[in-house]
Image (spheres, rainbow, N blue to C red):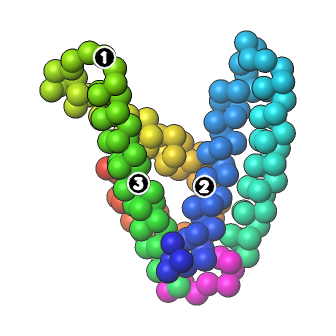
Amino acid sequence: MLSKSTWAVLALVCHIELFVLARYHASIDPDTGLSELYKDVFLHHAREESQHAILDELEWRRENANLSAAERDIAVDDLIALVGAVDGLLQIQAGADAEYFLKTSGRTFTAAEQERLRAGVLKAYRWQYIVSGVEDSRFQKILGDMITPAQADRIGKALAPILN
């Protein structure tokens, strides 16, 4: 991470802040069955995340304004590499969590069931930590304001295996 451009790191951080906010708005805020105390704690957390997202966006845009076209092109490659690294971690964690479940569930699974479980856990982790942020309209707008169509195409091709 330290070897990657500031632009790419800021993009990833902004992405994280926005998917955390999206999770709050999609799951906690509308749930009328949750305890009011629980909801209040997460409301304040969401407000803090919202402030972080605003600051991250401002800082990312400031960094973007300082880059040449060639530097931004390298930064796009760095962002692709960072998302790939996150995906690599998710693959390891999903595999470990699926194996733990298979060993501790108290039942036997067929090979096909085991494979579906592993694939399902990875898909869920990818959605939670990558896809939900990439699909966030605010993130798409910010990123789209900064990159060329060719760079967007490179990002799209790099994300295709993760999004499918």
Q: Main secondary structure of the magenta part?
A: helix
Q: Name the residue under label 3.
A: 89
Disc 1 packing (10 Å; few <14; some 14–19; many ≥20): few
* Residue 64, magenta (yes or no): yes
Residue appearing at x 68%, y 78% in the figure = 63
Percent x, y of residue 160: 35, 51
Q: Name the residue under label 1.
A: 106
Percent x, y for residue 124? 43, 35
Instruction: Judge whether residue 5 is colored magenta.
Output: no
- Name the element at disc 2: helix
List the single residue furthest toward the top. Answer: 33
Mark 3: which secondary structure? Answer: helix
Marks 1/2 in contact by CB < 8 Å: the verdict is no
Please identify, in this view, whether the residue under mark 3 or under mark 1 is nearer the observer.
1
The amino acid type found where label 1 is placed reads Gly
Secondary structure beneath label 1: loop
Distance Cα–Cα, label 3 vs label 2: 17 Å
Q: What stretch is highlighted in magenta?
A: 63-70
Near-viewer residue (31 or 158)? 31
At x 43%, y 43%, the residue is: 126
Residue 138, horizontal then vertical, whole percent = 66, 50
Mark 1 or 2, nearer chain start: 2
Q: Which amino acid does the dot numbered 3 rest on?
A: Leu
Which label sits on residue 15?
A: 2
Mark 1 or 2, closer to the camera? 1
